[in-house]
Amino acid sequence: MIRLLRKNGFNCFPIPSNQKIADYRYKASRTILNQTIKENENFGYIPISGMGTAIIDLDNKEKYKSFAEHMIKQGNMVIETPHGWHIPVVGLSGHISKIELFDYSFQSKKIIEIQGSDHYCVGACSQIIDEETQKIVKYENTGTNKVWNANNMDFHQFVDELCSQCKVESRKKNSRSSHKNFRDRFLKGLPPTK
């Protein structure tokens, strides 16, 4: 799995066993490439800046189970986590950054994150002690070994299509941090603020 992710433009780095919190070896986009990962260690993976990669982090297992199953049927890698799903993506163009997405009809906090080059996800085959149950749980690849290819799609278009498929949105329009609102205003030929 580590070799496959590295080959597809992700930086894999070690995380101490039985935890998902990275230690001193993780430095966001400055994390050293190709670090040795011991068999008894977990690992995290980060999209590498300029490689057209990102990770979709779906934070609700039941709500996004059908989307994850659809991605598996499409022949893509889907990592089942204790509380959701991770889907690595390659073939994106444009500036890729972390984006938080919301389904306000379901909950007020973020429900999907797209991780850019400063944020990581825990890799498949890693084991952690679940905070709620205190049992060891495993991150597992329930899909294939093929990473989802966005075929050179612009990152912002990719985000908009994901919003449509998963029925989520960026922050509410009255929020000053709404990237989608700025994009929508730009597309209408309006300045970014009123």
Image: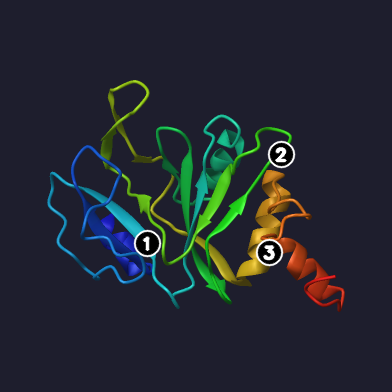
Residue 149 locus on image (x, y percent): 52, 64
Q: Residues within 10 Å of mark 3 (few under 14, many from 20)?
A: some
- Residue wearing tag 2: 104
Q: How many C-alpha atoms fall within 10 Å of the one at disc 2: few (<14), some, or many (≥20)? A: some
Q: Secondary structure at mark 1?
A: strand
Instruction: Please tell me the numbered disc located at residue 46.
Output: 1
Name the spot of residue 141 as percent of width and height, x first.
38, 43
Q: Is residue 154 above or below residue 142?
A: below
Q: Earlier in the sequence, mark 1 or mark 2?
A: 1
Mark earlier in primary sequence (2, 3): 2
Q: Is residue 72 left or right of residue 141?
A: right
- Depth check, front residue: 131 or 80: 131
**Residue visible at 54% across and 51% down?**
113
> What whole-number distance in Å separates the C-alpha atoms at marks 3 and 1?
22 Å
Q: Residue furthest top?
A: 133
Helix, strand or loop under label 2: loop
Q: Which residue type carries mark 3?
A: His
Relative to residue 15, is residue 104 drawn left or right? right
Q: Position of residue 111 (x, y in %)?
A: 58, 42
Colour style of the rendered protein structure: rainbow
Q: Is residue 16 left or right of residue 20?
A: left
Q: Examine the image and state in which quarter residue 182 appears.
A: bottom right
Q: Which mark is residue 179?
A: 3
